Amino acid sequence: MKGMSLIVRTIANISFPFILIYGFYIIAHGHLTPGGGFQGGAVVASGLVLMLIAYNAEWISQRIKESHLSIFESLGALSFVLLAFLGIIFGTAFFSNFLVGTESLFGGIPLDGAANINTGGIIPLMNFAVGLKVIAGLFAIVYVMAHFISKKEGKIA
Amino acid sequence: MFLEAIHIILPVFIILAAIIAILLKDLLASVIALAAMSLLLSLEFFILHAPDVAIAEAAVGACLTTAIFILAIKATKRNEEEV
């Protein structure tokens, strides 16, 4: 499978970092603004797929391996469940928000009602876990499909 | 008044884009029309006060499915044959 033209590749190179920053912004602000782990992860995966379409599958496979994507996807799901079980140990119940009210990261309570990034307890951490899983999962689908197509083209030619 | 006009005009454009996507014989142009339909649909979701759904629709509907369709077109022929 050949890559696209120089125009497509230049535009993809320019817009790729902005798409990544927008997606990570949606993930990090999931407890304050619309969006969250799934939406931001889908945006970041869209940016990665844009690079996969603009360049060819071999160019991507030199940089990211499919087994690493599987590891990241499993890591996201495992950290989500692990955070939920930590609620039993440190809090009261499954999914208990044990970080709220403490001095740790994301532990603040907004007393004046204004939007503050340092609040939410374990909710931002769970958004990060879901975002990692969605990025790896959605990108792996298109990645495997592109590799299947490039292998099939190699057999014909 | 302005919002009511948008609520009437936007679904008309969504249906028009969907009809164009069916009628076109060039499959790549048809996929672009489908992406335009998805983008207008996400705008409609945003006007209906569902920004969560709008972001998910714009990312998945307008970008990821378009990429998968383009990969599928690359693996097959670009033009639909006349019957």
Image (cartoon, rainbow, N blue to C red):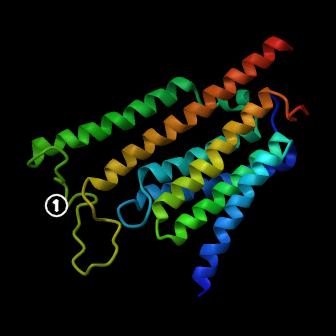
Front in this rendered view, residue A82 or A138: A138
Q: x, y percentage for residue A93?
A: 11, 46
Task: Read off the residue under disc 1.
Answer: A102
Relative image position of residue B2 (x, y in whole percent): 61, 85
Residue A13 in sight in this render = no
Across and down, in percent, residue A116 comes to 33, 71
Q: Point out residue B49 in the picture as x, y percentages from the top left corner.
A: 47, 70
Q: Is the residue B50 above or below the residue A6 in the image?
A: below
- Residue at screen point 38% across, 33% down: A75
Q: On screen, A19 above or below A64?
A: below
Name the residue rendered at 16%, 45% in the picture. A87
Q: How crowded is mark 1: few (under 14 residues within 10 Å), some or many (20 or more)?
A: few
Quarter of the rendering occupied by the C terminus of chain B: top right
View extreme (front): residue: B83
A47 left or right of A78 in image: right
Q: Indicate the secondary structure of the residue bearing disc 1.
A: loop
Left or right? Give the position of B71 relative to A132.
right
In the depicted view, which residue is nearer to us: A56 or B7? B7
Q: Splitting the image into 4 quarters, where does residue A59 fall?
A: top right
* Chain of the residue under the numbered disc 1 shown in the image: A
Q: In which quarter of the image is the N terminus of chain B?
A: bottom right
Relative placement, left or right, of A127 versus A19 is left
Q: What residue type is labelled 1?
A: Thr
